[in-house]
Amino acid sequence: MSENENVKRSRQKTAGLLKRFVAYYRPYRKLFCMDMGAALLVAVIGVVYPIITRTMLNTLIPERQYTMILVYGLVLLALYFVKMCLNYFIQYEGHMMGTYMQARMRSDMFAHLETLPYSFYDTHETGKIMTRMTNDLFEVSELAHHGPENIIISVLSVVFAFVYLSTINVPLTLIVFACVPFLLIISLKLRRKMRKAFRDTRSAVAEINASMESSISGIRVTKAFTNAEKEKEKFEIGNGMFQKARRAAYSAMGRFHSGNTFVTDIFNVVVLIAGGIFLYNGQIRYGDYSAFIVSVNMFINPVMTLINFMEQFENGITGFERFCEIMDEKPETDSPDAVDAGQLEGRIEFRNVSYAYDEDKNVLRHVNLTIEQGKTFALVGPSGGGKTTICHLIPHFYDVLSGEILLDGKEIHTLTLESVRRNIGIVQQDIYLFNDTMKENIRYGKLDATDEEIIGAAKRANIHDYIMSLPEGYETKIGERGVRLSGGQKQRLSIARVFLKNPPILILDEATSALDNTTEILIQQALDELCRGRTTLVVAHRLSTIKNADEIAVVSDGRIVEQGTHDELMKLHGQYYELYQLQFRANGGMM
């Protein structure tokens, strides 16, 4: 691809981003117009000082009009008071407009994140997502406020300056403005490098946040294994990347600012030399020359503001680009003809189902299984065989590569995602609990549940007595991810949550594998109560917990290699028999 084509594509991309960015101003049109109006008045007031200066030097002072000098001074003071009020409005209301837009974008992003499929979170780290929602959107809000304001004030100031300076001396004005192209050329050349440098910096910040999120979440593991130095080492790698990216960004910024400052300094030299020659030759009066020198800053300052705006624009548009990358991720969607599943009875059928996380590697291969309503179906086999993947396909967390999944004889794509998941309860090994009260964590299974329903669910999960032994009972905060609870207590709380949901289909994905034998027995009692009357799919590590299942399937290398009851599989002397005998010996002959 040629350089011209790259430039053209870059411009088209930027134009597209700006179009989407401008759309966020629409709800705040009134505030935007008021902010821009205030900016316009500030630009107009900025012209008054050099005008009054020139009038005083050329007329009022030579003619000794002391009263008018005082009047002009008071008028200028009054205008500066108005300017102060306008600047307050711009800074306060303008920044709030940027904050409103930032909050709206953050809400849009969060809402969109809620619609994204499991596969998105398989490949995107939490810390990086949070960086886009916080750091990047802050830069966008700064651009939203300062961008239009700086452009309006600066452009109008440059126009006013040109008109006013021309009234003083046209040739000298044209000489000054002839320096502008050099300034623009330097800025445009350095801008491209600065944009890439700032994007690299954002990526580095995202890496640091992801590393910190991972390390802080795993701080207890770090302490348990005394691996603090290892975590510091991992963090410093990201920190080093950040320093390297910042070095490149500041180098590009330094070249950008120093080059532009040098050119603007040349403006003063040009005015000093050219104006001095004009004054020497009698082409300009002393008062006009003095006013011109004072007024030239009225031109240089807004030009510098526009140049500095390029840096802010790069920051903001890069942040908005990263925001759009998330927003452009394809969300989960129902099929056009999908209908509400209503209350399912619980029959599950897999017909020749294959699935792959990566196109080159199938996780499931031509899986066929049927789970009748109210029956318990267990999946066993080596890790990585595909058991958990089968569990994830039933709630439609992923789309199958080929084949069909049917619930009550209805193909899963013909049912809405929400209605399918409403009928399924999941208890996993890795329980996620929110940093909230006992009550609210249970209520998550049914948001409109009454206190009586919550207590009833807790009793059925054998967690009520423990909760009541706490000083604050159901109002007890459990800490981040339930850190103040034991593994068994977490599991019973999650079981209470599913009791409250009361789904016809239940998935137990190694729900007790991380627990000790004593705790497992207590939890198993709650699980047995939970499974009663429901279609249950159990992924089991300990085979002793699924001996009484209606049917057991051995999953290995993405296939169901054996299927039957416990007694039938034991008679085959196949993989299930070997797994059972292995655990039997490991438990000292007791299972």
Image: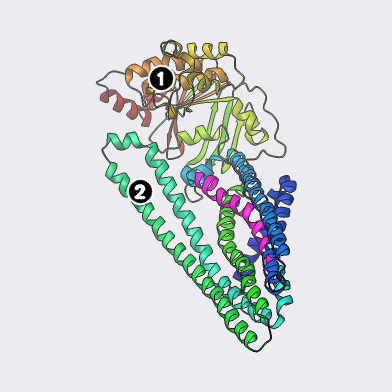
**Residue 477 colored in magenta in the image:** no
Mark-to-mark CA distance, 2 and 1: 33 Å
Say which residue appears at 46% left-offset and 29% top-offset: 432
Residue 231 coordinates in the image, percent (x, y): 32, 44
Name the foreground residue: 591 vs 570: 591
User: Residue 402 or 335: which is nearer the viewer?
Assistant: 335
Marker disc for residue 58: none
Q: Does the magenta stretch include residue 134?
A: yes
| Quarter of image, res 192 | bottom right
Label 2: element kind: helix
Q: Which residue is identified by label 2?
A: 235
Q: Which of marks 2 and 1 is in front?
A: 2
The mark found on residue 489 in the picture is 1
Q: What residue type is labelled 2?
A: Phe
Front residue (pair 105, 567):
105
Residue 386 in the image: state x and y as whole percent: 45, 37
Left/right placement of residue 152 relative to residue 388 reads right
Q: Is residue 529 visible?
A: no
**254 in relation to 433, above or below:** below
The span picked out in magenta is: 130-158
Of 554 and 298, the residue lying toward us: 298
Q: How is the image coloured?
A: rainbow
Question: Residue lying furthest bottom in this view?
Answer: 281
Q: Which amino acid does label 1 sit on?
A: Gln
Instruction: Tell me the residue at 62%/87% (across/down).
Output: 280
Q: Residues within 10 Å of mark 2 (few under 14, many from 20)?
A: some
Q: In which quarter of the image is the N terminus?
A: bottom right
- Among the 4 quarters of the image, the one containing residue 64: bottom right
